[in-house]
Amino acid sequence: MIDSDPEAALEHAKYAKAKASRVPIVREALGLVAYHAGNWSEALSELRAVRRMTRSDDHIAIIADAERALGRPERALDLAKEADTAKLAKAVQVELAIVAAGARRDLGQLDAAVVSLQGDDLKAEKRDPWSARLFYAYADNLAAAGRKDEAIRWFLNAAEADAEDETDAAERAADLSNENADEKATKEKAAEEKDTEATDE
């Protein structure tokens, strides 16, 4: 229901909370549904409550992403630094790194965003459950930093790793390739016009 009708799912989750507000799994469900519905403040409130109740950082990446969505990238970075990553599941570690990189990009730290995602998991041959998302995020940050050729390569890597077609990596690679071709054509035309002017003189 979260994907097909997020608003209805949200109402169900709110009703459940009204009946059992002290049950962590109920608060967790409401927080996750609110997050998927784009209700960042409510998601943040509920998942913070779950974090307090369970003393678990299982949803730290989502909490950080909600902070970022609310225009608080510094807070998202603080959460990433505070988290004991050694105790997090690998998927959560990777997702938190992706969110932190996005926060750095929000702050204009483009090169730092790119570097922060580099590591053992960033290998084109990897096919872990999180590989496609990691490759995509890396490519996205490369593109933001103006490194289009590298971005195209990593979007293609993401497309190859994305067995479930959950991203638009192939389309992003094609769009960037077209942009590069247009820029090259424009430069060549400008160079030809300059040569022509020089010959005429």
Image (spheres, rainbow, N blue to C red):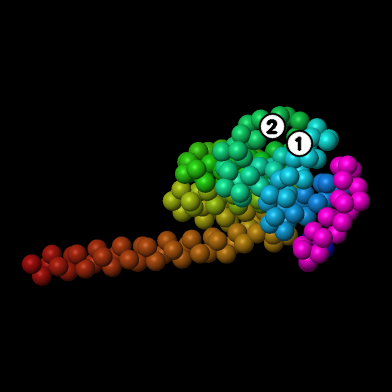
39 up-or-down from 101: above or below: below
The magenta stretch spans residue 5:
yes
Residue 18: image x %, image y %? 87, 51
Name the amino acid, label 2.
Answer: Ala
Image quadrant in which the N terminus is located: bottom right
Q: Is residue 77 above or below residue 66?
A: above
For the stretch drawn in magenta, what is the main secondary structure?
Answer: helix
Callout 1 secondary element: loop
Identify the residue position indicated by label 1 in the image: 57
Q: Which mark is residue 34?
A: none
Q: CA distance from mark 2 to mark 1?
A: 7 Å
Residue at mark 2: 83
- Residue in the picture at 82% in, 46% down: 28
Query: In this rendering, would 141 be left or right of 193?
Result: right
Label 2 or label 1, whichever comes before in sequence order: 1
In the rendered image, the residue lying farthest to the right is 19
Q: Residue at x 30, y 64 (%)?
A: 188
The reply, left or right, for residue 127 in relation to residue 193 is right
Name the side, left or right, on which 104 lies relative to 1: left
Q: Write down the region rendered in magenta.
A: 4-24
Q: Determine contact: label 2, label 1, CB under 8 Å.
A: yes
Give neighbour class at mark 2: few <14, some 14-19, many 20+ (Cα, 10 Å).
some
Q: Nearer the viewer, residue 118 or 110?
A: 110
